[in-house]
Image: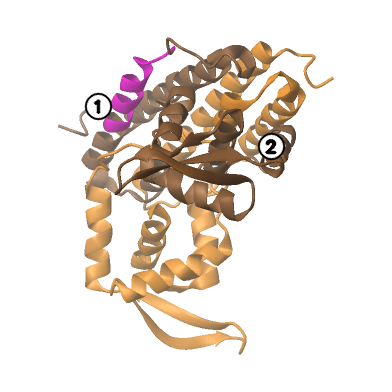
Chain colours: A brown, B orange
Amino acid sequence: MPLTHAVLALVVERRGYGYELVRRFDDRVGPAWRLNPSAVYPALDQLERRGLIESGPRRGGTRRSPRIVYAATPAGAAALEGWLATPKAQPEPLRAELYLRLAFAQRRHQAALAAQLDAHASACNELLTRYPRATHAPAALGGGTLLDAAVVARLRAELAWLAQAREMLGHNAAA
Amino acid sequence: MPLTHAVLALVVERRGYGYELVRRFDDRVGPAWRLNPSAVYPALDQLERRGLIESGPRRGGTRRSPRIVYAATPAGAAALEGWLATPKAQPEPLRAELYLRLAFAQRRHQAALAAQLDAHASACNELLTRYPRATHAPAALGGGTLLDAAVVARLRAELAWLAQAREMLGHNAAA
């Protein structure tokens, strides 16, 4: 549950309410990781059930969407520290729908696959225009430049293999 | 649900039972995508509920784990064709726990982060030793070489940015 850890990290940094946490996530991690705002509420509920954060009194908002402010508990701060201090044992495998398409496509799907590769390349190029970001959280290790460098290198690499795959597939595939 | 599509693709190719489908998935897509064998049964159940595959009589196996053979329905073949012929509208964003760690790590987590980067690099290097694969499904577009080329390029790229991030983090971080 990496997202839950990220939400916990934001609340440990300073107390906040749902939508504000979404904005702070975007400031810190985006735009390469587009967060679905509705994903933050189940994460907050889960963290509260586990005693890692607690909800305070409502502060403003509307009746339909009250602002409930969350603060970290000492157990929450310890859990965050544990996550950041412990390297993950199992690195993530390469799971991408694109690989499955490459594995199962037949000759008659060549044009669709080429279009998929092109769409993926466009998305990477579009993201690249937003990096490096202008503002960084000063608290983070490397002030966020480490994350930006990683994302830029990853996007360029993605574009390189997409170009290679596109070449192998044939430039006329989409025609 | 890309995994469900992959299981459907295997059953459309020819009828099969759970464990055999897991082996065929590994032959076709692995080793970069390590499939959890238990994930194939919910996918088969879901495909059957949607009328895309149907289960035949039990053929052998043991009483505890009978072999139920699945075959694709015409609707299943059409659904697979639809998936492969339709480019996905929204390419996947860069979601990796490693990015969240880069975003939230503080100076005191430098050694743990360096260890994480190293573990990730080791996993990529280990995977690289298994490519290109010796056997390919002849039916696939490019006979599987397209997938292999993509995975190799992706792994090399991953290693390149990991080395860069490691450099930025400081070579003595893990000491």
> Does the CB distance between marks 2 and 1 fall below 8 Å?
no
Q: State the residue at coordinates (67%, 43%).
A: A90
Instruction: Quickly name the residue at label 2.
Output: A77
Q: State the residue at coordinates (43%, 56%).
A: B3
Visible residue check, residue A85? yes
Chain of residue at mark 2: A
Q: Seen in the image, is A2 located left or right of residue B43?
A: right
Nearer to me, B37 or A20: A20
Nearer to me, A158 or B1: B1
- Magenta-tinted stretch: A119-132
Visible residue check, residue B142? no
Bin the neighbour count of mark 2 within 10 Å (Cα to Cα): few under 14, some 14-19, many 20 and up.
some
Q: Seen in the image, is B73 located left or right of residue A154?
A: left
Q: State the residue at coordinates (53%, 43%).
A: A56
Tag of residue A171: 1
Residue extending furthest left?
Answer: A175
